[in-house]
């Protein structure tokens, strides 16, 4: 009898498992990439929608009146409170801020952390290296294609224009989501796919092992019968009922045993 390492069952199981791993590995490479892209895309759409809603709720005429040094005045505090309330409504949002053009660059106006002790900018603080997405937000909602650096950390951001009563754009609102939150969303998808693939491989391995074990059991029965016949023992019973090649082999063995019994009986009579 062949040892387990060289048995057909081991080879079949190993071969099928390798095939399953190869197929699932290729599936994983394509699926994870597409899934994480979709997660980032849906997050970007979420930020753009939230920025648009926030911009629609803000009073553009009031924000346009804010000048450096007015952080203690009621006009500033009211708008800062409004941004803080919007930011706190979604725990995944790290900051909501407003900004406007200043000369050839941009400057911050309000940020949502003012009334909770997490204010990072004051009116007139320059926006370092405004991104193309921030600049394009003066003409319509936009979103960053990748993570950007802010004074409060690494974020993914969406923007929308702020308009006054005449419909003129006076600035933009930015909604920032912590990069770690976005990354956790994408990691969760990858981990879920990992788990599904692992369970799939495990189930496939078990099914293949059970199938091959049943097949090898019948082959071992035929081997034992052949060994008995080689020793002259024709009192062999083969109880294999299959509709495959092993079943055909078992039928051939049964016919061979019957033929041997007939020949042995004839030889005995001639003696």
Image (spheres, grey):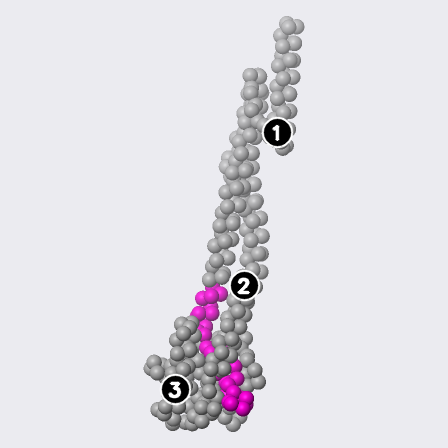
Q: Is residue 34 above or below residue 178?
A: above
Q: Earlier in the sequence, mark 2 or mark 1?
A: 2
- Disc number placed over residue 247 in the picture, else none: 1
Please give the residue where the numbered disc 3 appears in the rendered image: 78
Q: Mark 3 Cα within 10 Å, few/some/many (few <14, many 20+)? A: few
Q: Is residue 6 above or below residue 28?
A: above
Q: CA distance from mark 2 to mark 3?
A: 41 Å
Residue 119 shows up from this direction: no
Q: Earlier in the sequence, mark 2 or mark 3?
A: 2
Name the secondary structure under disc 1: helix
Q: Mark 2 Cα within 10 Å, few/some/many (few <14, many 20+)? A: some
Please give the residue where the numbered disc 2 appears in the rendered image: 35
Q: CA distance from mark 2 to mark 1?
A: 47 Å
Q: Earlier in the sequence, mark 3 or mark 1?
A: 3
Considering depth in this image, is 39 or 32 the residue closer to the camera?
A: 39
Q: Quadrant of residue 79?
A: bottom left
Label 2 vs label 3, nearer the camera: 3
Circles 3 and 1, Cβ within 8 Å, touching? The answer is: no
Q: Mark 1 Cα within 10 Å, few/some/many (few <14, many 20+)? A: some
Residue lying furthest front: 165
Residue 166 shows up from this direction: yes
Span shown in magenta: 158-187
């Amino acid at each position: 009898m062949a040892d387990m390492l060289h048995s057909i069952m081991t080879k079949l199981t190993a071969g099928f498992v390798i095939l399953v791993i190869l197929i699932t590995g290729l599936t994983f490479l394509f699926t994870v990439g597409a899934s994480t892209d979709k997660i980032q895309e849906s997050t970007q759409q979420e930020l753009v929608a939230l920025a648009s809603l926030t911009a629609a709720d803000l009073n553009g005429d009031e924000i346009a009146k804010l000048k450096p040094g007015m952080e203690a005045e009621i006009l500033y505090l009211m708008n800062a409170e409004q941004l803080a309330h919007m930011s706190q409504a979604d725990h995944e949002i790290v900051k909501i801020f407003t900004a406007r053009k200043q000369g050839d660059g941009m400057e911050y106006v309000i940020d949502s952390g003012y009334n909770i002790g997490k204010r990072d900018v004051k009116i007139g603080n320059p926006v370092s290296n405004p991104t193309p997405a921030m600049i394009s937000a003066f003409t319509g909602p936009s979103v960053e294609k990748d993570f950007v650096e802010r004074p409060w950390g690494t974020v993914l951001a969406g923007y929308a224009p702020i308009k006054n009563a005449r419909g003129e754009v006076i600035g933009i609102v930015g909604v920032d989501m912590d990069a770690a939150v976005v990354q956790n969303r994408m990691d969760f998808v990858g981990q879920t796919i990992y788990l599904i693939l692992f369970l799939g491989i495990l189930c496939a391995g078990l099914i293949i092992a059970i199938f091959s074990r049943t097949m090898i059991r019948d082959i071992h029965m035929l081997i034992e019968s052949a060994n008995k016949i080689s020793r002259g023992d024709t009192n062999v019973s083969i109880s294999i009922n299959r509709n495959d090649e092993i079943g055909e082999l078992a039928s051939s063995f049964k016919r061979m045993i019957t033929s041997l019994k007939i020949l042995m009986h004839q030889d005995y009579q001639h003696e």
